[in-house]
Amino acid sequence: MSMVTKLVVLSVLTYLVSSEEEHGFNDAELTRYDCTYNGTKWSHGTYNNTNPECRFYWCNNGTMEIYNCTNGPPPTYSSCQYVRWNKPFPRCCHYVGAC
């Protein structure tokens, strides 16, 4: 490699390194937002799937997402009472018969 080629390569590398530092091409930090729901503060990414109303609460970057069961109780049969499972969401959406 000639001396001129070496100088050009060195100059280009020096320029690239210095321009990266000047313009701050570092990875930007992501901003995550907390949620407030019914007076309770939730941190981003936290969830609650164990509650008496059988819902899934999830704080997703400032938006409180709430998921309900998509099913209702099955039709009544004889004198059986149908109650939800006492499990975390979504298993609490299932009913068991107490006859």
Image: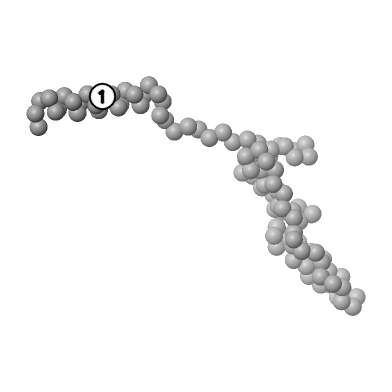
Above/below status of 57 relative to 40: below
The residue lying toward the viewer, choosing from 9 and 71, is 9
User: In which quadrant of the rendered image does the C terminus lie?
Assistant: bottom right
Residue at far bottom of view: 78
- Mark 1: few/some/many CA within 10 Å (<14, 14-19, 20+): few
Residue 59 shows in this picture: yes
- Under circle 1, the secondary element is helix
Quadrant in which the N terminus appears: top left
Residue in the picture at 9% in, 29% down: 2
Residue identifier under label 1: 14
Compared with 96, 59 (above or below) is above
> Along the line of sight, which residue is nearer the eye, 50 or 17?
17
- Amino acid carrying mark 1 in the image: Thr
**Image position of 97 with respect to 22: above or below:** below
The percent position of residue 9, horizontal first and vertical second, equals 19, 28
- Give residue 5's quadrant in the image: top left
Left of 67 or right of it: where is 25?
left
Instruction: Identify the residue shown where x is 66% and y is 43%.
Output: 59
Residue 7 at x, y percent in the picture: 16, 24
Q: How many circles with numbers are drawn on the protein?
A: 1
Q: Which quarter of the figure has residue 71?
A: bottom right
- Is residue 21 found left or right of 12 in the rendered image? right
Q: Residue furthest left?
A: 2
- Answer above or below: position of 78 versus 47: below
